[in-house]
Amino acid sequence: MTESSAADRRLAAHLDPDDLVADRQALRRVPGLATELADVSEVEYRQLRLERVVLIGIWTEGSAAAAEHSLAELAALAETAGSVVLDALMQRRGKPDPATYVGSGKARELRGVVAATGADTVICDGELTPGQLRQLEDVVKVKVVDRTALILDIFAQHAKSREGKAQVELAQMTYMLPRLRGWGESLSRQAGGRVSGGAGIGTRGPGETKIETDRRRIRNRMAKLRREISGMATSRVTKRQERARHEVPSVAIAGYTNAGKSSLLNRLTGAGVLVEDALFATLDPTVRRAQTADGRAYTLTDTVGFVRHLPHQLVEAFRSTVEEVAEADLILHVVDGADVDPESQLAVVREVFREISAGDVAELVVVNKIDLADPITLARLARREPAAVFLSARTGVGLSDLDVALEAALPRPEVAVHVLLPYTRGDLVSRVHDMGELQAEEHTPEGTRVQARVPRALAAELAPYAVIAAGQAAR
């Protein structure tokens, strides 16, 4: 079958409901996602270190291209976690099977693929219920991991700070709690005599004490982690309140994972933050000070990236971190212009903004990686987001446009002042430079004459030094 006929068949299956049943008869292999290496010696070396995985996804709605893109992202997540992808399969069906996710027949087919490839793990492109996870493992006979567990594993590998590690552990335990196993295996089932329907002497046991003990320990650990995270968040809240007291505008760099947020922060501030071509390379927020072209100071915060189907446990655990986005004066929403579907990135990130109560914060869309992007994609984005800034953080092209857009988007000081500051109050002159918008400055024998726009708090401190015009003095 030629490529065009295969494409026609997929299109017909998408459009014609009668073909849906036929299309469900087999698992469809998604080409181009295998990452197994050709060099035998290197493969043998990597087999000692990496899990060998088969991906499985379900296409329930939308186009085939969107479903394949989601599976390609799952492959990138698997590689980031340290796995080698052997095969990728996708099934079209109305909704996931409540028992085994892909249906019992397809689960047996999947078992054959796992045996043929020598895989030791199956990764599903979705969040499985505890029952689906257990029953699918019973069929395929290898470990089964869902998308949520995979993302949690990546976060666990990348967390460096004490707070980041605590947040990841809390999210993992929240995910693990309903998935504890052991019934009928490592636990004793409670049994009694004939009255209670038991088998009698020799069969009585302590009941489900082990699993209840495990649950109690996990709940206690979760409570302790929440207290620790709350305590660690206090210092960040204090710093944020201090910046607000001095009315220093704050800008949060947010967006899809691997869109180039850390690269942009480094370009704007020289922060020296780790830049890596990997998903979720940044988990801990980094705050740096920067200045607009007209001298106004503001803070830039690099934040954790978002992804499709971001686990709810992570959003909750990282709430103290993502508050940096919700509390910002402006969000730089970074989009990967080289991605095959940047519009879906925009939609996913904006949905997360709404979840964390950041939907009303002013937003400036920054389309990054234009040196790698398709011009047609960029033109489409320009029509969709006419106020967006297009740049390359790697080459520096377009950064001057971002400086201009930032200067216009940041909140401006509210109060106009005209003051004569004695030379003994150089501290106030310095704060006008840092926090205000300087319009004129003149050094006179009496002191420094300054005209500027400043925040209200600073204007109150400058009031005793206000210059009174002759006409006002006469009145």
Image (tube, rainbow, N blue to C red):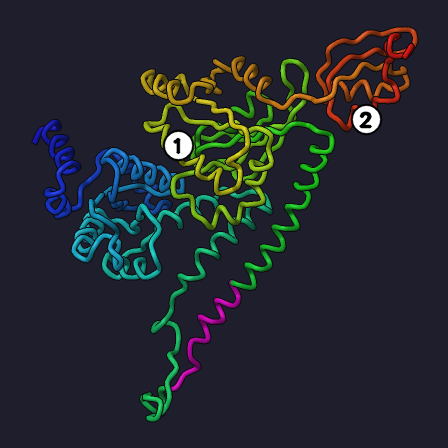
Q: Quadrant of the C terminus?
A: top right
Q: Is residue 208 magenta?
A: yes
Say whether residue 305 is visible: yes
Q: Residue at x 53, y 41 (%)?
A: 357
Determine whether the residue tagged by mark 2 lies in a helix, strand or loop. Answer: helix
Q: What type is the residue that disc 1 sits on?
A: Gln
Q: Which quadrant would residue 238 be assigned to in this image?
A: top right
Residue 109: x %, y % from top left: 17, 52
Left or right of residue 467: residue 216: left
> In the displayed structure, does residue 57 sit left or right of residue 272?
left
SS class, disc 1: helix
The residue that disc 2 covers is 460
- Comparing marks 1 and 2, which lies closer to the viewer? 2
Q: Is any atom of residue 40 visible in this view?
A: no
In primary-sequence order, the first of circles 1 and 2 is 1
Residue placed furthest toward the front = 475
| Magenta region, residue range | 204-218
Evaluate if marks 1 and 2 touch, with contact meaning CB atoms under 8 Å apart: no
Task: Give the overall secondary structure of the magenta segment.
Answer: helix
Instruction: Tell me if mark 2 has few (under 14), some (14-19) or many (20+) residues whose alpha carbon lies within 10 angstroms of its own.
Output: few
Mark 2 is on which residue type? Answer: Ala
Q: Can you identify the residue that label 1 sits on? A: 345
Taking 258 as reference, is 355 above or below it?
below
Toward the viewer: 443 or 229?
A: 443
How many dots with numbers? 2
Q: Is residue 236 left or right of residue 367?
A: right
Image coordinates of residue 1 in percent, x first then y, are 7, 32
Residue under the image location 15 percent in, 47 percent down: 24
- In this view, the residue in front, 169 or 18, is 18
Q: Residue at x 47, y 71 (%)?
A: 212
In the figure, 242 relative to 473: above or below? below
